[in-house]
Image (cartoon, helix red, strand yellow):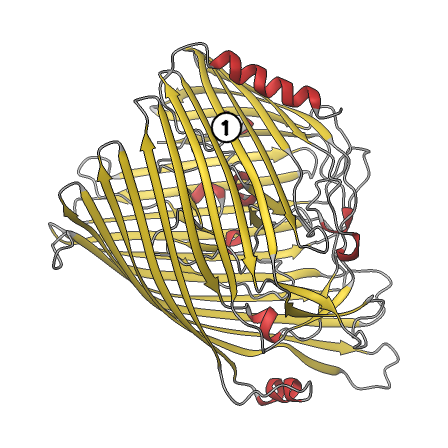
Amino acid sequence: MKAVFPILLYFWTTGLFAQEDTTFVDMRHNNLDEVLIIDTWESKDALKSKVEFQPLEVQLKQIQGVSLVSRGSFAQELVFRGQRDGRIQVRVNGMRIYNACTDRMDPSTSYVVSNNLQSAELSSSCESACAANGLAGNFNLKTKEACLSKTDSFKFGLAQQYLSNTHGLNSSFYLENSSEKFAWRLNGTWFKNKNYRDGKGREILYSQNQKQNWSLNTIYRLGPKRFISLDLIYDLATDVGYPSLPMDVSIARGLIGGISYRSYHALGPFKDYELKLYHNDIYHEMDDSQRENVFMHMDMPGWSRTSGLSFNAFNWEFSRHKIEWAAEYFSNYRRAEMTMFPDNGLEPPMFMLTWPDARLHGLGTGVSGHFNFGLHQLMLNIRFDYESSSITDKIGRDQWIGMGFNMTDARTYHLPQVSLNYSRFLNDQHQLKLALSYGKRAPTSSELYGFYLFNAHDGYDYLGNANLKAEGLISSEMGYVYSHQKMNLTSTVFIQQFSDYIFGLNTNFDAMTFGANGVRAYENVGAATFCGFELGASYQIHNAWKAQSTVEYIRGFRPQSDLPLIPPLQIDFSLNYSYGHWNFAPQLRYAAEQNHFNSDYGDRYTPSYFLIDLAANYRFKINKANTLVSLAINNLADSYYRDHLSWAGIPSMGRNISLGIKYGL
């Protein structure tokens, strides 16, 4: 019964909206804090407007279907329709990035900051184009770019924000310089937060963090239709606490760079094309030196280096149809170590490779066709990838030979993907969508070669399995869109059926980690099913008033039991009111209780919660510069709650008041 009022509120408001005429507005995102931003975000799947200083992952959560696995208040792991790393792919400016932490404390999103994000492009497995091969979905985070200009030669911006809950101070700036032939943009961000407090006023220890991020983008005109651009990102996080884990992070460093050549001269039948060469170097160091009552001190550094070359050809047009082609090669190296130091001083340190110099090489190519038949539209995507994975370190090979595996040959995988997306316009206001896809993915480095990786959520050490088969997925979606002047309604129902699903099962091995419940090894366990729906509505009530609402629900299960870390029903409802230079936005957030959980894998019952957020800002000019002062209050009632995807059941943040100011040309 607790869910009845929010659900009725949603359908009452959407029913009310449907009584009036409206224009189509693509409502993929719903966010209270849109009043706090100056920048314009443009892309069909872009984050239209977000809080400048909130962690990027928190902003991405506003996209329908996206949730976050939280091990603390920093670097949450992105989840799309119940799928995480390995089953979804996250790129930055089209570049692959593989994390360097065996506990996934450093997802790809952690190396991009919100004030430097231009767009977040999301596609499900049924919508994906040939440039990416995420089995269950793809993200591409595009950072802001310099622009060639005859007139706007110099721009700058400054921003400052204070957060009451963490006593956090967040600062950022950008500088841009442009000419007709050369332009550059420099972006810098720095923030520092102390431990946060939950809704009962209790301090959540080891939740502090501090970070700096620098980004440089340049573009040079080689000719009227030829350009070369450079992207560089340097990210350094230090003293990052993770309250749900037994270890923190002393340093997480990312150096990411890519150089692109873009030509608008024809290449065969294609009107334009892009060639990109990139490399990234990630270092991550887990540390328990600041923890109390540590049984045995451990150092756990990790490295990940990825290089890649991608080619994309666009706009082969014939009649009303269009074809794109993509090809790429990439190589990834990963190594993680664990050194244990006995407290008695008599025994020597114990050394182990938890990622034993894993090498991954991949080669892929694909084609996407967009076919337009008037009221009927069809998108066909076909891609094929070949991946080869092996261990190059002798100690690492010997570890697995001792476990009974033959490590002489590399593990190779042939990975086809195909999707068909059909759209039918019933008239100017109604559109139906049907989609079907099939694909395979190779196991991750942890699933293949992870050696006693401790999972703090379920309390087990995990072993890889070098004999794993590729995982398969059949996905289907059905959607409906209604748009009429001020009104937009969207709905999607989906089902994902996995085969050879990779999952951890209990073994008879003895645990390595002190206090662990046992050891689990990854196996191909057969079938797994994910299904759910997403609803969205927006309505321009008046020139000054706009209402938005979303509803999301997902189930994930195997024949034997529910799957862990699946979010419950969630509903958001927000209003936005503008008056002169002022803007106001209240928001209601609701999550139902989660009764479908798997306690054997660390899950627990999660009560429902209902939150109220408020925000306001005021815009004005100082010497032709745009200036914005903002105030936001999240969790206004200081409610005590926790999200179901929070590891170890850590409570979420209580009331947080943020005050910010932005100034820039």
Spot occupied by residue 334 in the image (x, y as percentages of width and height): 53, 73
Q: Quadrant of residue 289?
A: bottom right
Across and down, in percent, residue 536 comes to: 50, 28
Name which residue lies at 34% across and 21% down: 429
Q: Nearer the viewer, residue 445 or 221?
A: 445
Position of residue 288 relative to residue 209, above or below, is below
The image shows residue 624 at horizontal and vertical percentages of 33, 24
Under tag 1, what secondary structure?
Answer: strand
Per the image, the residue denoted by label 1 is: 536
Q: Is residue 389 left or right of residue 343?
A: left
Q: Quadrant of residue 23?
A: top left
For label 1, the crowd category at 10 Å Cα-Cα, with few meaning under 14, some 14 to 19 and many 20 or more, is many
Q: Is residue 239 left or right of residue 89?
A: right
303 or 25: nearer the viewer: 25
State the residue at coordinates (33%, 58%).
Answer: 382
Quadrant in the picture for the N terminus: top right
